[in-house]
Amino acid sequence: MKPFRSCFVALALTVPLLSGCSGDDAGEGRTPAPPALPSLASLPDEDPDPGVLEVSMRAMPASKQYSGAKPSEVWAYEGTVPGPLLEAKAGDQLVVHFQNELPEATRVHWHGVRLPAAMDGTHLMQAPIEPGQGFEYSFSLKDAGLFWFHPHMRSDVQVEKGLYGTILVRGDGEPTVDHETVLVLDDVRVNADGTFPEFLDDESKMMGREGNVLLVNGVSGPEIPMQSGALERLRIVNVANGRFFNLRLEGHAFRVIGTDGGLVGQPWDTDTLLMAPGERYDVVLIPNGKPGSVVTLWNDPYSRGHGSLAAAPELLATVRLATGASLSGRSLPSAFPEVEKLPAGAADIPVVLGEKFDDKGELVFTINGQVYPDVPPVLTANGSVRTLGVKNESDMDHPFHLHGFFFQRQNDTGTLKNKDTIIVKAHESMELTARFDEPGKWVYHCHILEHAEGGMLGELHVQ
Ligand SMILES: [Cu+2]
């Protein structure tokens, strides 16, 4: 697949010269036009009540062609990769009649959604949904923001095979923009014959599986339509197993207006946006190019440890500015209501992220020196506000994810954020405060899926 990546890089450098790449689909010496950005599928609402979004959704085998490979046998929600985008308002009830048509058991986890533990889709609270069986998920969507869903069972395999979808929940007081686009970032490792290479090779076990094809809404190197002078809003999620994306849009800064748990009080500007698996960002920008021009969205190199630095930026997508006149009149939003601050307390829940070699000489990932399920559960009272002292003693970054609750980083630089997934860099420490106001058994884990499945996971019991 390497030739394809370099093909798209060449494309980016030569647009709009229409020369270069001579891959199979290049035709008569012409570079193929980049694919249009696919819009995300939706599901029909089966309940006329405007306060209820009720859908039926299957996890099922399907076929999908990645880049120049032959079609791959994927697993997909309702047959599409990415799966459906569920759109609702804060306060709505989401009801999902889920049916498992896969050849193995699964469960659905609603990443970032604050919900009853029994709906969270983990092994602690839900039996596996066996092939041919179903489950009704039903919960209220309390918070506005972009969330996503994926299996919480053999997730390293099931997510890589295509099982993920998004939930966009709108709140009051959101900015008025000209266009809004949801971008689902992923990568997939696929052979030219369409098959997936063996899972859990040594490199994947260490770094999390990285693919040879980068995907935006399921395709490689799509063209994202925007308009010069327009206020463009991008809702972005990284659903990859292990890859961090480090986004940079040529000639533009991103204004970050929100993250995992919704809008932030004081938006900030950045030239690059680093996103670990599981994280979401909500950004706005006003394209400043000439109508009709093309700018490149790059994935810049980032080192997350163990010699992981890529050699050069990779093309993720292109942005084509509409040929119509520049819009003007809207400006970038600069403030929103502040996130409610949780009272900080002593960091008395230690969470040390580590790596070691076990008795068999295998690299394993640990929490407080133990490999799950040997990690003792954290116990806390319902309604308690507690602070986790998260310390990364390993030589690589780990995106720390807490189920069911948002946390706030103490002494964070900049504006207060509600997060559910945060990058804890190699040898970095941080204090994360959360209000544990929903009883049940929850998990926290590294969102590099191979690390979570390999033992970097702990339980948190709210009693
Ligand atoms: Cu990790």
Image: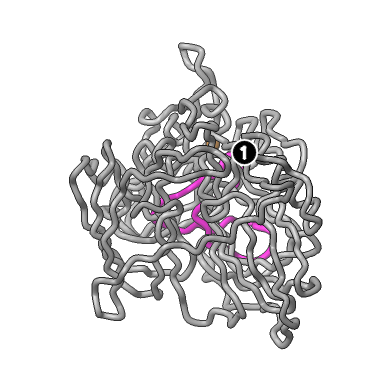
Q: Is residue 323 magenta-colored?
A: no
Q: Is residue 189 left or right of residue 133?
A: right
Q: Which residue is mark 1?
A: 397
Q: Residue at x 48, y 16 (%)?
A: 358
Q: Nearer the viewer, residue 293 or 151?
A: 293
Q: Is residue 105 left or right of residue 191?
A: left
Dividing the image into four equal quarters, which quarter contains ligand 1? top right
Q: Residue at x 24, y 71 (%)?
A: 46
Chosen colour scheme:
one colour
Residue 33 picture location, percent across and down = 66, 56
In the image, the segment drawn in magenta is 397-424
Determine which quarter of the picture holds residue 259.
bottom right
Q: Nearer the viewer, residue 68 or 215?
A: 68
Q: Is residue 145 above or below residue 59?
A: below
Determine which quarter of the picture holds residue 180.
bottom right
Q: Residue at x 48, y 81 (%)?
A: 172
